[in-house]
Image: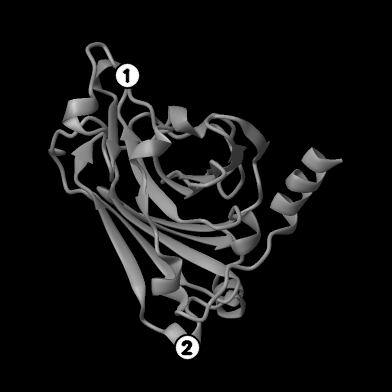
Amino acid sequence: MGEGEGFWARWGAESSSVANIKMEFTIEHTWDGIPVSHEPVTVRLKSGNAGLVMEVSAPFFNDPPAPLGEPGKPFSRLWDYEVVEAFFLSDRTEQYLEVELCPHGQHLLLLLSGRRRVWKEELPLEFEVTRMENKWEGKACLPWNYFPPCTDKFNAFAIHGSGVERKYEALHPVPQHELQEGQKPDFHRLEFFKELNLKGLMGEDWKQPESDIWKYLTDCKTD
């Protein structure tokens, strides 16, 4: 998907000043804290010249079957399929970026202002997938323009399976003492997200670039 080698060379997999620095997260539990029964999904964040490079390494369940949309393009309601998701949150404003990546090549990016309040979706994305029989790897470029101001919290999720076998997994699950009888999976429990120190990835002198997209939302609210 995307433009291949030329694109990644131009975009820059890592900036030279912070080369080889990455964050790695392993999704080892279901949304309610039960250990997963398969090789866990791994999400890596790396510094890039124009944003973050997000890499996924995950088992390939091929369940549900592939979405009918074109690989490399946005696909609505991708969360109904096999996906790995990452949420980047500004804790102060409850503004966040939701990234959904599918092993079949489709993707879905949403911008939310307030819990579950989507105001922009199906943003373009450079996304490449390598799929093997039982495993898949993905690599996506997340431009800084998509990140809400003061991004400082994070969570990641994985979904696969169909019907009663549908599995919902979380990097930071709902704590056991917060679970209630009959509770359903909800990836928008922002209070359980944990700190994401982007300066630790980008360098202590780094400042998050201003986003024209998010500035437009703010300007509209003040008009």
Residue type at mark 1: give it.
Answer: Lys
Query: Looking at the image, which residue is at 60% across and 56% down?
Result: 149
Left or right placement of residue 37 versus residue 133 in this view: left
Q: Is residue 187 above or below residue 124?
A: above
Q: Which residue is mark 2?
A: 17
Q: CA distance from mark 1 to mark 2?
A: 44 Å
160 or 221, nearer to the observer: 221
- The residue at 41%/46% (across/down) is 103
**N-terminal-most mark, 1 or 2:** 2
- Residue 40, numbered circle: none
72, 140: nearer the viewer: 140
Determine the secondary structure under disc 1.
Answer: loop
- Report x, y in % for residue 1: 55, 57
How packed mark 1 is, by other alpha carbons closer than 10 Å (few <14, some 14-19, many 20 or more), is few
Name the residue furthest bottom.
17
Location of residue 37 with respect to 99 vertically, above or below: above
